[in-house]
Image (cartoon, coloured by chain):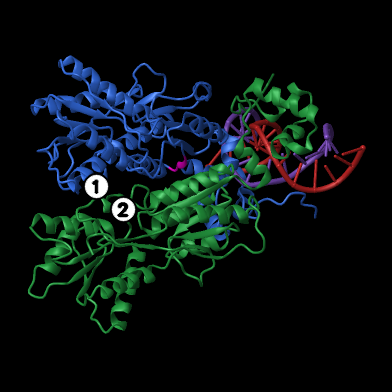
Chain colours: A green, B blue, C purple, D red
Amino acid sequence: MSGKRKGLGRATVHDVAKLAGVSSITVSRYFKQPDVVSEALRLRIAEAVQTLDYLPNQAAGGLASTRGRIVAMVIPNISGPIFANTIQSFSDVLNRHGYQLLLASSYFSVEKEEDAVRAFLGWSPAALVLTSQYHSAGTERLIAKAGIPIVETWDYAPERQPLQVGFSHLEVGRQAVEYLHGKGHRRIAFVQNSLVGDLSALDRRDGYMARMTEQGLEPWVFVPTEADPFEAGRQAINSLLQRKQPAEAVIFANDNLAAGGMLAGLRAGMRFPQDGAIFGFGNYAFSELLLPSLTTIRPPAREIGEVAALRILQALGEVEIEGEIPHLNLLDCELIQRESA
Amino acid sequence: MSGKRKGLGRATVHDVAKLAGVSSITVSRYFKQPDVVSEALRLRIAEAVQTLDYLPNQAAGGLASTRGRIVAMVIPNISGPIFANTIQSFSDVLNRHGYQLLLASSYFSVEKEEDAVRAFLGWSPAALVLTSQYHSAGTERLIAKAGIPIVETWDYAPERQPLQVGFSHLEVGRQAVEYLHGKGHRRIAFVQNSLVGDLSALDRRDGYMARMTEQGLEPWVFVPTEADPFEAGRQAINSLLQRKQPAEAVIFANDNLAAGGMLAGLRAGMRFPQDGAIFGFGNYAFSELLLPSLTTIRPPAREIGEVAALRILQALGEVEIEGEIPHLNLLDCELIQRESA
DNA sequence: TTGTAGGCGTTATCAC
DNA sequence: GTGATAACGCCTACAA
């Protein structure tokens, strides 16, 4: 009987409606607002759904209602040691409310981020999550006119338009100085991330520099040339600790660098913290397993994902909230004192 | 002027078509098969797209063409130390070809996996990726009639319908025994994963048992009661090494357990491998950072993601291939000999 | 509580 | 090479 197009071959609302002896809109209501459908029809529809193995077509639904149950997230990387926790918790909370996660990584490149955002917007996501406050001009334009909730995570820039869920990297840098200074150290160095593009790490460095200056101490920033973080760490240790006037403490831009540096030192016969205090950032999984274990700062990775998801669900009206949705969500980092500093 | 529905408020093909003075189908072709559109029109359309900031609506496109450019993946967990690499490489390859990744985690629960699969199928994904060969009956039914390429990763079950991209956990178990036996060890124990649901880990145990038996050695399986992997590892070390006839070598179900065990031993004054060889699985990021560094087996995490994506793209006709698409993709694990065994 | 009509934005199909 | 038409599967708006 004709059929000029093929379709998916799956059952549709119409099939279910016919089998249940109702109109298709009633089947639609059965899924969206079950309490509006009478008990009798509900049972008939449920049976038809069973029989036909009916699955609502989300693309069609999203198209018709102009609001797809999908949320998009761009993150620097998935396999790195810290962002995965954010993705995990974010995705879990969303799934629980029937939303699906669309994911892509930017590798700390604002161009790749823009590509991902453009691709995502084609899916008319219900909301969009980005990492940090730093984006390309193109991304800024896209999100400005996207007309959906935008959330920036892993950073805290109160003056920006998008919802903020994260923490201040500047504060983290200051906090590290504070701690080491309190331990009596004066010659405190900072090892920068060799990964260009990680702009938040530069904020941590700036916080370090600001606090050092305030304390009347001279900032001492080491910039590794090695790309591999473990190698870069080794390079830093060699340069900072094996000299006449060695650093008393070294703050690394992240735990990878710190671990690489510490390991190189240990294998060269050094002892920590005796030969220099080692301070990291990130509280990666291995940090407590090192000998000595690594003193570091734990960013609220999981919490960021949870809060971001919650705010989005509230903005979408899926979760109730009294009053305004908090625009600024400043979460706590935790300084974890261990053996290395 | 009526307008009974609102729509997204964004520009559509029709807007672009009107501005460019062509029909909307030509705009569609401009995106799908640019070489079919004449140079002149292409320029006009490009300009209109620019002016209007037009973004193709993927949901509408997917609906009309019955093939959305989306691929769904269910993985045990995102934040764990090993699967993230698979997700990362998988997503990267797909993105490069204009496909987006829909992601959810099962936490090693076949029920959660089924929920995710059902939710995903509503999006009419172009393909579906699962982890391991173990699923619920419901999932089996769903994938059997999904009518899209299905890929099972991180395992290798030649007899199964879905495309296989992974490795044999049984083989991994045998390989560990082989290695330790070759080092002269006879009293070789295996520490099971305390995480129920990780069925592939049981396959590794079974491989261990089979090989031990073949060698005329008696299998010795320890089942931790502690849930936390580090605690479970400690428990295992205490039980296996601090006795009259201690184990000479211990194979752990994964690197987390091994690290926990080794660390507990070290802090108690033990030395490795002198007081017992320690063997892991997974080659987690920290494994090379431990002192002693951990001997383990590296699963082809990244490669699995790449190959899975490639096979899917080939099945979808996005990537050329001569002949049949290989159904069985057995990838190599790498035994990484380090200091602990 | 249930149904009718028609549109959401795109693309398959057929015609020129 | 380009266009007219209808259909993909669902949901909003309105009516009963």
Residue B330: name its quadrant: top left
Indicate left or right for B119 with A298 as reference: right
Q: For numbered disc 1, what is the local secondary structure?
A: helix
Q: Amino acid at mark 2?
A: Tyr
Q: Chain of mark 1?
A: B
Query: Toward which corner of the image does residue B150 lie, by quadrant?
Result: top left
Q: Nearer the viewer, residue B255 or A341?
A: A341
Question: In this rendering, is residue A107 above or below B255?
Answer: below
Which region shows up in magenta?
B98-104
Foreground of the two, C8 or A74:
A74
Quadrant of the image containing the C terminus of chain A = bottom left
Tell me if A287 is positioned left or right of A39 in this view: left
Q: Position of residue A212 (x, y in %)?
A: 28, 79
Residue at the farthest front position: B244
On the rendered structure, is A312 left or right of C1?
left
Please name the residue shown 46% across and 55% down the image: A303
On residue B286, the disc is: 1
Instruction: Measure the alpha-carbon separation of dots 2 and 1.
Output: 9 Å
Task: Please tell me which residue is depicted at 23% across the width and 75% down the height of the picture.
Answer: A184
B269 or A147: nearer the eye? Answer: B269
Determine the main secondary structure of the stretch shown in magenta: strand
Check chain identity for marks 2 and 1: say if they share one.
no
Q: Is residue A38 magenta?
A: no
Circles 2 and 1: CB atoms closer than 8 Å: yes
Question: Which dot marks residue A284?
Answer: 2
